[in-house]
Amino acid sequence: MKYQTMVNMLMLLLSRRKMRARELAERYDISLRSVYRYVEELAVAGIPIYISRGRYGGIAIADTYRLPVGFLTKDEYAATINALAAMSSQVNDDAILTALEKLKSQFRRENAGHAVSGNIIVDGGTWGDAKKFSDKMAVCEKAVNEGLCLDIDYISRSGEHSRRIIDPHVLIFKQNVWYIYAFCHTKQDYRTFKVGRIKSARFTGKTFKKREISREEIPLDFGHRSEGLAELVLEIEKDKLPDVEEWIGIDNIEPRANKFIAEVSVPDDDGLVSKILGFGGGVKVLAPEGLREKVISAAQQIIATV
């Protein structure tokens, strides 16, 4: 863990050249004392890293410094380059692009005749205008990095429009979807917003002081605690199997006779009935009985309006 953090710090400094100690401490969830200790160990290892004092001071690395030959193995270069390339397609950060180009250049020098690029692609955007989503991600990422308040127009799952002033702290990528974890001035509490549901995002011109947030504090289940889950048992026709696999994962489905049975816990929200109806007659709810009745009722309402 310590070695990984030191390498990450070094890679970040190679791209940005200078950062404040507190920024590094917050990014890697370590103490200021640990930051200075890692800087000292990197300096002892021969890396030209130094601490400058004053208003514009910080931890810096010499502009002429390059990673020493053999610092990373070929596989480590490949993994790092692919990860950076994947993220750069979503987060429009010049620092990521700079670090990516430097790594590629060094890799070519150390591994003549080999090439690594783009083996992993991350696309958390929606079908449609990819540039609009990328621009929106760039605004969110800048707000998180620089502690800038955002004024957002947000559309909830139920279609409700609201305007929020938020202090963005963390960007989250989960199940192919980007979220932003932020302090909401309207609710006076931390909330998780889906980036794809942000219609517009503007800088307010104000800044905020980011507080340290550990990974454990962030509700990565996005509010769906155990009491908000439905224990589903589904019967699936073969032609609908690929669609259901993408929804709940192949590990939760097993073949039985001529059908497939899925047993899984999913968020019991307003969208669950619509999701099941979206599979047409290819998916049958075996349990729970309450959900089965809701699906039947919703289907009857649809028939009545046709």
Image (cartoon, rainbow, N blue to C red):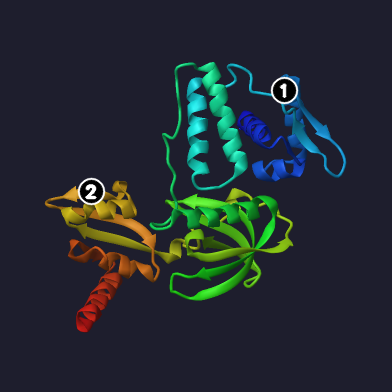
Q: Residue furthest left?
A: 258
Q: Nearer the viewer, residue 118 or 293?
A: 118
**Identity, as a three-letter code, of the amino acid under mark 2:** Glu
Q: Are dots 2 and 1 in contact, CB under 8 Å?
A: no
Amino acid at dot 1: Ile
Q: Quadrant of residue 303?
A: bottom left
Q: Quadrant of the N terminus?
A: top right
Toward the viewer: 219 or 60? 60
Question: For the view shown, which residue lies furthest in the right direction?
Answer: 54
- What x and y, as percent, mark residue 240? 21, 56
Q: From the viewer's perspective, is residue 132 above or below residue 16?
A: below
Q: Residue at x 81, y 33 (%)?
A: 51
In the rendered view of the protein, which quadrant contains the C terminus?
Answer: bottom left
**What crowding class fits label 2: few (fewer than 14 Cα within 10 Å), some (14-19), or many (20 or more)?**
few
- Asked whether 253 or 112 is in front, the reply is 112
Residue wearing tag 1: 47
Task: Tell whether 147 sits left or right of 238.
Answer: right
Residue at 63% over, 23% down: 67
Q: Earlier in the sequence, mark 2 or mark 1?
A: 1
Q: Which mark is residue 254?
A: 2
Residue in front for this viewpoint, 249 or 56: 56
Classify 35 as above or below 123.
Answer: above
Question: Which mark is drawn over residue 235?
Answer: none
